[in-house]
């Protein structure tokens, strides 16, 4: 554990992270597809299709803390009653990637500043959309992921009724399992226990080590 120039306590040592997990299983960053095999991933930051225009993750993987993963598993079951499922765009994000995003955008509305860090860095935030369960095809929602326009705001209403309904279904399913939506991004949700978990700056390859 170290304190960075902004006074934030960060875990950047894999050994320390694994020690935490050994003493408290809830600290584990779970690979979501291990727990939810039918989950659809569209990890944009593992491709150039993102705000930076280049891949910032080495692999298209999604990790979250164990209680978050278990809550998402329950969301997936609830959505299945509507013939729908989750599509995950992003989950755990190393702190160093958050710094890159902020340096590129310089806008606290859409990028967490380095002096605060992101709840993504805690493994407690997810960016999600919806897909048809049977086909895996995306379901229409207000905007594309990371489209930073007024239509991305959760209260934006100038949309077709079927899009509004899809957004309502997503918001209700996530809220029902303890997720709080960020009002300027319909896709962003924070798990209600986020404050219980440390900021992390660990690469993906450190998380699968046993």
Image: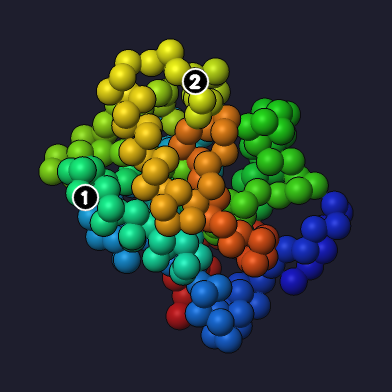
Residue 205 shows in this picture? no
* Residue 121 versus residue 14 in the image, above or below: above
Q: Nearer the viewer, residue 85 or 172?
A: 172
Circle 2 — which element? loop
Drawn side of residue 169 relative to residue 89, left or right: left
Residue depicted at x 56% and y 57%: 192
Tag 1 residue: 80
Disc with the residue nearer the chain's start (2 vs 1): 1
- What x and y, as percent, mark residue 135? 14, 40
- In the rendering, which numbered label is found on residue 200? none
Residue depicted at x 47% and y 67%: 67
Distance CA(mark 2)–CA(mark 1): 26 Å
Residue 184 shows in this picture? yes
Mark 2, other Cα within 10 Å: few <14 / some 14–19 / many ≥20: some
Q: Nearer the viewer, residue 138 or 78?
A: 78
Residue depicted at x 31% and y 32%: 166
């Amino acid at each position: 554990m170290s304190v960075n120039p902004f006074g934030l306590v960060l875990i950047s040592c894999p050994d320390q992270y694994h020690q935490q997990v050994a003493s408290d299983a809830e600290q584990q960053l779970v690979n979501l597809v291990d727990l939810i095999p039918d989950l659809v991933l569209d990890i944009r930051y593992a491709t150039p299709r993102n705000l930076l225009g280049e891949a910032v993750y080495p692999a298209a993987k999604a990790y979250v803390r164990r209680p978050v993963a278990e809550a998402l598993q329950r969301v997936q079951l609830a959505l299945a009653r509507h013939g729908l499922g989750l599509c995950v765009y992003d989950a755990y994000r190393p702190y160093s990637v958050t710094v890159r995003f902020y340096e590129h955008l310089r806008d606290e509305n859409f990028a967490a500043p380095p002096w605060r860090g992101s709840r993504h860095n805690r493994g407690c935030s997810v960016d999600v959309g919806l897909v048809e369960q049977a086909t895996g095809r995306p379901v229409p929602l207000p905007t594309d992921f990371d489209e930073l326009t007024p239509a991305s705001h959760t209260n934006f209403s100038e949309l077709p009724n079927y899009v509004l309904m899809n957004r309502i279904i997503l918001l209700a399913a996530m809220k029902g399992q303890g997720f709080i939506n960020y009002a300027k991004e319909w896709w962003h949700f924070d798990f209600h226990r986020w404050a219980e978990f440390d900021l992390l700056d660990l690469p993906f390859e450190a998380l699968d080590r046993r």
